[in-house]
Image (cartoon, rainbow, N blue to C red):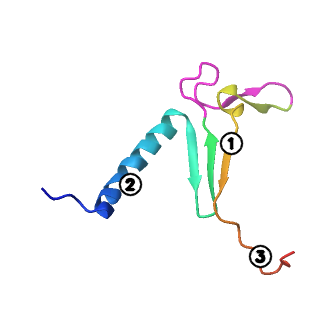
Amino acid sequence: MRTLPRSLMAAAAVPVALAAAAAVLKAGHWKLYADRHRIHLTPVARRSCPHCRGAGGWWAGGPFPEMEACGCWSERRELHIRLLPVPARFDEPPF
């Protein structure tokens, strides 16, 4: 019986890991943004919230109405993970 090379096994594990990560983010009500400089996770309003019903908030009355954020997402903190430093602009001195 032959075994698969390690690189082929790793290549097969990547889509499974991505699908699992997507399911966890959706179940935990998180939105993911990633690029080469950072990974950014932001909370998303729950569709099952009895207060906002997934809208994320409501409008407060008065002469100048404002949007009040619901606690189902606004009281959760955002997560930032820095990966690579952002390159300096060419018109700015390095220090």
The residues tagged by marks 1 and 3 sit, at their Cα atoms, a distance apart of: 27 Å
Q: Which residues are magenta?
A: 45-63
Looking at this view, is 58 or 23 the one in front? 23
Q: Residues within 10 Å of mark 1 (few under 14, many from 20)?
A: few
Q: Residue furthest front?
A: 1
- Can you identify the residue that label 3 sits on? 89
Asked if residue 65 is positioned above or below residue 82 in the image, the reply reads: above
| Label 3 element class | loop
Quadrant in the picture for the C terminus: bottom right
The amino acid beneath tag 3 is Arg
Question: Which residue is under mark 2?
Answer: 14
- 51 is within the stretch colored magenta: yes
Give the residue number, with chain letter if any, for mark 1: 78
Residue drawn at (70%, 37%) of the image:
77
Label 1's element? loop
Across and down, in percent, residue 56 comes to 65, 32
Q: Which residue appears at 40% of the width and 46% of the height?
A: 19
Q: Position of residue 45 (x, y in %)?
A: 61, 32
